[in-house]
Image: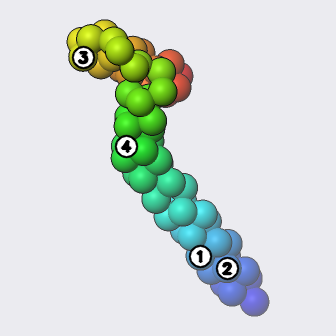
């Protein structure tokens, strides 16, 4: 009985971790840079926009 509970917990955690990784990959790497450039860095030089994006990612990772 104890093995079944442990297995259920492991499967639950694995699915949670998989979903969290999918979110991080798609949103933070795919959508956020485009959204950032279009809404918060409109009309700004590329170097400034890249710097701001790098700072936002650095602060978010703390």
Element marked by disc 2: helix
Q: Which residue is mark 3?
A: 46
Q: CA distance from mark 2 to mark 4?
A: 31 Å
Element marked by disc 3: helix
Name which of mark 4 and mark 1 comes first in the sequence: 1
Q: CA distance from mark 2 to mark 1?
A: 5 Å
Tag 2 and tag 1, C-beta contact below 8 Å: yes
Q: Nearer the viewer, mark 1 or mark 3?
A: 3
* Neighbour tally class for label 2: few under 14, some 14-19, many 20 plus, Cα within 10 Å: few
- By what rule are the colours in the image chosen? rainbow
Report x, y in % for residue 12: 64, 72
Compared with residue 53, is residue 20 higher up or lower down, i.e. above or below? Answer: below
Q: Which residue is mark 4?
A: 29
Q: Which residue is mark 1?
A: 11
Question: Residue shown at 37%/47% (left/top)?
Answer: 30
Q: CA distance from mark 3 to mark 2?
A: 49 Å
Decide if residue 51 is in sight here. Answer: no
Decide if residue 22 is in sight here. Answer: yes
Question: Residue shown at 24%/16% (left/top)?
Answer: 46
* Neighbour tally class for label 3: few under 14, some 14-19, many 20 plus, Cα within 10 Å: few
């Amino acid at each position: 009985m104890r093995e079944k509970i442990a297995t259920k917990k492991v499967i639950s955690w694995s699915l949670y971790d998989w979903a969290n990784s999918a979110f991080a990959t798609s949103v933070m790497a795919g959508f956020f840079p485009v959204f950032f450039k279009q809404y918060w860095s409109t009309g700004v030089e590329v170097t400034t926009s890249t710097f701001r994006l790098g700072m936002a990612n650095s602060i978010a990772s703390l």
